[in-house]
Amino acid sequence: MRGAVPVFIVVAIAILIALQILRYWRRPKERTFRCAKCSTPTVHTGRTIEAWRIGKQKFFCDSCHAQWLQSRATQIASRRAESSGCLGIIVVAVATPLIAYLVVKALT
């Protein structure tokens, strides 16, 4: 029983890493897209591939995206202070199995 908890933790971490790697390899089938604003055929970039990965359907070329960013520059600056979570998710992902292991160890 004592060896099962560390093995579980290792397997859980391995699964999380494998899922992240598989997510990174996913790419759109089409090499190009039409900009949703100006209809220019454009090759996918890292930004548009990330948008595709999270389920976006409309993509914008770099120049239209730059115009959009300039139009909302003040909103982005205020949002940066509020954005957090990635570190929090990592802490929870590491702390949960560790706490479970310590509880099981304390009970046995």
Image (cartoon, rainbow, N blue to C red):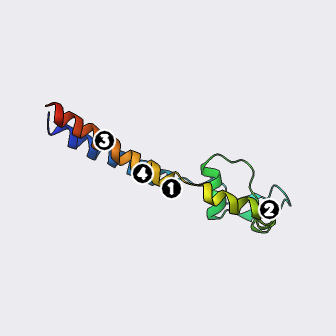
Quadrant containing the C terminus is top left
Q: Are marks 1 and 4 in contact (CB under 8 Å)?
A: no
The CA distance from mark 1 to mark 3 is 25 Å
Q: Earlier in the sequence, mark 1 or mark 4?
A: 1
Report how far apart the C-alphas of labels 1 and 4 lie in the structure. 18 Å
Helix, strand or loop status at disc 4: helix
Residue 90 is marked as 4
Q: Earlier in the sequence, mark 2 or mark 4?
A: 2
**Residue 70 percent coordinates (x, y):** 79, 67
- Judged by depth in the image, the label closer to the viewer, 3 or 2, is 3
Q: Which residue is mark 1?
A: 24
Name the amino acid, label 3. Answer: Pro
Real-space Cα separation, disc 3 to disc 4, in angstroms: 12 Å
Question: Which residue type carries mark 1?
Answer: Tyr
Residues marked 3 and 4 touching at CB (< 8 Å): no
Say which label, 1 or 2, has the lower sequence index: 1
Residue in view at x 75 percent, y 67 percent:
62
Up-down relation of residue 95 to residue 50 (above or below):
above
Q: Position of residue 85 (x, y in %)?
A: 52, 51
Query: Which label's residue is closer to the chain start, 3 or 4?
Result: 4
The amino acid pointed to by label 2 is Trp
In the picture, the disc for residue 63 is none
Q: Which residue is mark 3?
A: 97
Q: Amino acid at mark 4?
A: Ile
Q: Which residue is mark 2?
A: 68
Task: Give how far apart the Cα atoms at labels 1 and 2 are.
Answer: 26 Å
